[in-house]
Amino acid sequence: MTRPLYDRHRAVLPDWLALYYRQPIEITHGEGRHVWDADGNKYLDFFGGILTTMTAHALPEVTKAVAEQAGRIIHSSTLYLNRQMVELAERIAQLSGIPHARVFFTTSGTEANDTALLLATAYRGSNQILAMRNSYHGRSFSAVGITGNHAWSPTGLSPLQTLYVHGGVRARGPYAHLSDSQFIEACVADLEDLLGHTRNVAALIAEPIQGVGGFTSPPDGLYAAFREVLDRHGILWITDEVQTGWGRTGDHFWGWQAHGRSGPPDLLTFAKGIGNGMSIGGVVARAEVMNCLDSNSISTFGGSPVTMAAGLANLSYVLEHDLQGNARRVGGLLIERLRAICAQLPVVREVRGRGLMAGIELVHPGTDRANPEAAAAVLEAAREGGLLIGKGGGHDTSVLRIAPPLTLTVAEAEEGAALLERALHAV
């Protein structure tokens, strides 16, 4: 059934628009943690539309809120007062941990990061940005310009001057052999040295856990140590919480809180899970930073009544049902189960992650070389067995990415781990 649609896709859409699987599937509907394709096959979803269906497929509270709002009015734009947008902004500002916070809504994480870069460069009067190696921040011209992952950087042109810092990848690179404290010390020294060669840097942008980069992260406290250096130079800290926000890591509501010793970030970007599939992104910033622009601006679709209604309903569900706690409990069990499965598999270099955000890095057995062929094969075998996962990584896309909805049950975690075990052994 999907072959004609695939042919039509190839005839009218860009060649570079990535599709999973040798025979791509059309997902037609979902419920809870499961989805179905056009051929009637049922899958346990461990990727959630790239971490976007954060709570559950067809969550009644969200679908009801969307339907009711759509029956009243779908769109008005930010030129008019919008009660739902104000209410969601109030809740996010309070949850962000940023003092005197202001919130601006966009339609995606890319646009959120683009806006944060605009604010930071305008506030600081500089186009110099510090970014992390192996990072990913979106597909706009400016976001690509700060992306440190070659697989997602289609051009070297950029409106920004980007300088890359060590630290986003703990288990690879020149500091991998160091202890956690030594690793942080070396990365801070690298940052200090880098700043000695620059002029007026605007900001550091960093994902607390790198998403597309393969769910890599530094030791807790690295960005707090960076913040002490940044503050001495007046440099802003932007935390990209597009994938780590809303309790997914289990231990924290935001990824930056693992690095919060030196206080909250100056700017925080979010998207993906807050809409549970609806197009919501945004920026939270200190008022003086958010208000630094000296010209008019609007967002035609950002903060629309329908998406804001979805966000309010979804956020309420996340908080009322303690999905952060569920991510910690069930995610912890899942990661330990995956580590046990992979312990005797020479193709697996590392199982890493936090909460319901786990990565399995694959290599050629007996070496440290990335094995993208094995990752692609496991992805196919998992789908054939009824499990959807993702892949990524900074070394030739050799990491399996596992990020189920935050309502995942213990039984579903065990089922998914068993399906993944069979897929790993199959290749």
Image (cartoon, helix red, strand yellow):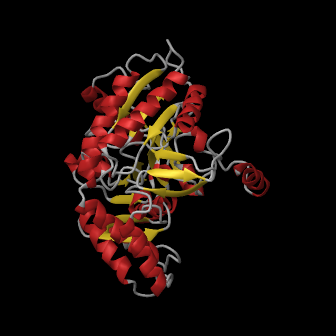
Q: Position of residue 9 (x, y in %)?
A: 73, 54
Which residue extends farthest right? 11
Q: Relative to 304, is 23 above or below?
A: above
The front one of 231 and 49 is 49
Which residue extends farthest front? 40
Q: Is residue 97 left or right of residue 278?
A: left
Q: Quadrant of residue 234?
A: bottom left
The structure residue drawn at horizontal position 37% and vertical position 32%, both measured from the top left corner, is: 352
Q: Relative to 223, is 419 above or below?
A: above
The structure residue drawn at horizontal position 28% and vertical position 35%, both measured from the top left corner, is: 333
Q: Position of residue 339 (x, y in %)?
A: 35, 26
Q: Position of residue 320 (x, y in %)?
A: 23, 63
Q: Position of residue 106 (x, y in %)?
A: 47, 68
Tell me if residue 86 can be seen.
yes
Tell me if residue 133 can be seen.
no
Q: Is residue 226 left or right of residue 130?
A: left
The structure residue drawn at horizontal position 43% and vertical position 70%, both measured from the top left corner, is: 63
